[in-house]
Image: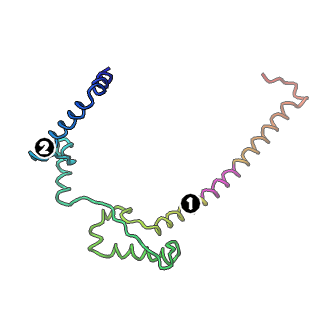
Amino acid sequence: MVMKVVGKIVTKMPTATILAVLILTSLLGYAYFGIGAEMEAEEETFLPDNELVNAEIEIKDIYGTTRPVQVLVKSKNGDVLTSDALTEMLRLEKGFLEDENINSTLISERNPQRMISPADTIIIGKILLDLIAEMDVTFQDMNASFTGIGQMVNGSHAAINQAIDTPYLNTTLL
């Protein structure tokens, strides 16, 4: 309903509408740039004022925050997935860990994911593939066991049916 009224006003007086928008924009621009109104949009502005939040802010102020850094490796032959290139990546990673200046800036000694390379990803993939292969063998063994159990149950079922169907028993099962 309101939009229809606004639409009618704009279509009847387009020049006045444009002038009103320009005047409003000029006033807001003057208020921001001319007077020097400052706008604060830091994370702390939106956080509640409690002990836990204040402690986190203090820790960030003292120790700073963490951010990921990427190290790009270029292979001499252009293929970073060769054995030599992957080994070199692991040597580089080991060098970073052994350098006290670099190691001290890493996230945490307890965090195993503080540094990961394509070589690490391939090693993890190999471990997972080996685990899947072991699980496949285990499931095949389980399947063979269940097949054997199924055959025993079927044999027992057949023996029970044969005993029930024997004519000389003269009994009826209810």
- Membership of 31 in magenta stretch: no
Q: How many marks?
A: 2
**Classed neighbour count for the residue bearing mark 1: other residues with Cα under 10 Å, few (<14), some (14–19), many (≥20):** few
Dot 2 falls on a residue whose secondary structure is: helix
**Residue under the image location 28 percent in, 25 percent down:** 12
Determine which residue is flagged by label 1.
131
Give, as a single range, the part of the protein colored magenta: 134-145
Determine which quarter of the picture holds residue 136. bottom right
Q: Is 12 left or right of 45, judged from the image as shown?
A: right
Q: Is residue 153 above or below residue 134?
A: above
Q: Identify the image quadrant of the C terminus.
A: top right
**Residue under the image location 14 percent in, 39 percent down:** 27
Extreme-left residue of the structure: 35
Q: Identify the image quadrant of the N terminus.
A: top left
Prevailing SS of the magenta stretch: helix
Q: Of marks 1 and 2, which one's residue comes earlier in the chain?
A: 2
Q: Is 158 left or right of 119, judged from the image as shown?
A: right
Q: Amino acid at mark 2?
A: Tyr
Which label was assigned to residue 159? none
Return the residue nearer the eye: 108 or 119.
119
Q: Amino acid at mark 1?
A: Leu
Q: Is 80 left or right of 169, judged from the image as shown?
A: left
Determine which residue is flagged by label 2.
30
